[in-house]
Structures are given as C-alpha cells and as structure tokens.
C-alpha cells in the first residue's frame, strides 16, 4: 500500500471558508478516482502554520500511484482546485 501525502501553502486570498470548500472538493473529487483506496484532507491543527492544508491518498501500489497521477479526474482537480489556490506544495510517498 502506498500513502501519497501532500502539504500545501495557500495563496493569501484563501480564507477559512474557501479552505473548507477546497477540503470538501478534495475528498469528493479524489475519492471518485478508481485507483484510490482512501482519501483524507484537512487543515493543520496549528494556527498560522505555513502548511495549512494537507491531503493523503492511499493506493494499492506504485503502479496505481502512477495511474492516479495521470488520471483525467486528478488532472482536472489539479487545474481547478490546487493550482488556482495554492502557491507551494510538499509531496511524500510512503510504502505502508
């Protein structure tokens, strides 16, 4: 099992309400991808941390992770949710 964990820095205009929308959209859109076993998304519990938003995706294998990366639903999510509202990211992949 692979855990794909991503931390994001948000653009300054993203307020708490918008972050809530991003989190809900992340859960619904990434959860619809066939290669994904589980999706989690949320806010950093430490206020004013530089990485206020995270997502984690569990996949069965590295091959499934590669398929996820190019899946049209994932690409559309990146274009409509991540790129417009984030300014930096840190991604880590773990074998769990």
Image (cartoon, helix red, strand yellow):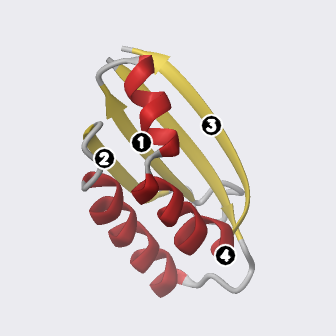
Q: Which is more foreground, mark 4 or mark 3?
A: 4
Residues tagged 4 and 1 counted as in contact (Cβ below 8 A): no
Determine whether the residue tagged by mark 3 lies in a helix, strand or loop.
strand
- Residue underneath mark 1: 56
Earlier sequence position, callout 2 versus callout 3: 2
Hey, which quadrant is residue 57 in on the image?
A: top left
Distance CA(mark 4)–CA(mark 1)? 20 Å
Distance CA(mark 2)–CA(mark 3)? 15 Å
Seen in the picture, residue 57 relative to 13 is either above or below; the reply is above
Earlier sequence position, callout 4 versus callout 3: 4
- Residue underneath mark 4: 84
Label 2 packing within 10 angstroms: few (<14), some (14-19), many (20+): many
Percent coordinates x, y for residue 70 in the rendering:
51, 43
**How many tags in the picture?**
4
Distance CA(mark 4)–CA(mark 2)? 21 Å
Of all residues, the one furthest to the top in this rendering is 95
Q: Residue at x 63, y 55 (%)?
A: 8
Percent coordinates x, y for residue 23 in the rendering:
40, 67
Hey, which quadrant is residue 13 in on the image?
A: bottom right
Residues tagged 1 and 2 counted as in contact (Cβ below 8 A): yes
Instruction: Find residue 39 and name its label.
Output: 2
Earlier sequence position, callout 4 versus callout 1: 1
Instruction: Find residue 91 and name its label.
Output: 3
Q: Along the line of sight, which residue is nearer the eye, 22 or 67? A: 67
């Amino acid at each position: 099992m692979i855990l794909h964990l991503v931390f994001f820095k948000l653009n300054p205009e993203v307020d708490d309400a918008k972050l809530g929308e991003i989190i809900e959209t992340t859960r619904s859109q990434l959860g619809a991808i066939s290669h994904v076993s589980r999706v989690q998304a949320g806010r950093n519990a430490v206020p004013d941390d530089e990485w206020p938003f995270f997502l984690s995706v569990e996949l069965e294998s590295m091959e499934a992770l590669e398929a996820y990366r190019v899946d049209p639903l994932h690409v559309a999510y990146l274009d409509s949710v991540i790129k417009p509202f984030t300014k930096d990211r840190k991604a880590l992949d773990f074998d769990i």
